[in-house]
Image (cartoon, helix red, strand yellow):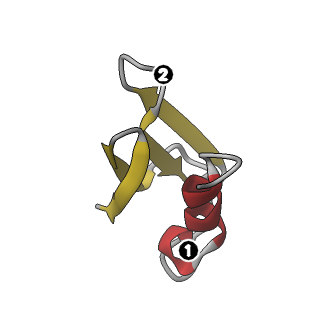
Amino acid sequence: MSVWGGESIHDAILSALTSPPTGRKVNKLAFTYNGDGSINTIQFFDMKNNLLFTLTFSYSAGSVVSITRS
């Protein structure tokens, strides 16, 4: 079992899953949370505050089981 439950989130942020579209740069992140305090979504915005993409997290028994980019 992981010592730090946020490892999946950390790994996703550092992976290609969070690469911005070609020619765009991420300038701002916005978070939404579930009732238990876990991250529900992370929205990625560019310098002009345009939404580039969103990561949505799914959990089972308190662990991240999937991350969907939309």
Between 3 and 30, the one nearer to me in the picture: 3
Number of callouts in the render? 2
Q: CB under 8 Å between callouts 2 and 1?
A: no
Q: CA distance from mark 2 to mark 1?
A: 26 Å
Instruction: Please give the residue where the numbered disc 1 appears in the rendered image.
Output: 19
**At 33% across and 45% down in the image, what residue appears?**
59
Residue nearest the viewer, comparing 28 with 62: 62
Indicate whether 49 appears above or below 22.
above
Q: Which residue is mark 2?
A: 37
Q: Residue at x 60, y 46 (%)?
A: 5
Identify whether 23 is placed above or below 69.
below
Q: Which mark is residue 52?
A: none
Residue 45 % position (x, y): 52, 49
Residue 67's x, y, as percent? Answer: 37, 60
Q: Quadrant of residue 34?
A: top left
Q: Residues within 10 Å of mark 2 (few under 14, many from 20)?
A: few
Mark 2 lies on a secondary structure that is loop
Looking at this view, name the residue that lies furthest to the front. 1
Q: Dot 1 lies on which element?
A: loop
Residue 52 position, x and y percent, is 43, 58
Q: Residue at x 47, y 31 (%)?
A: 38
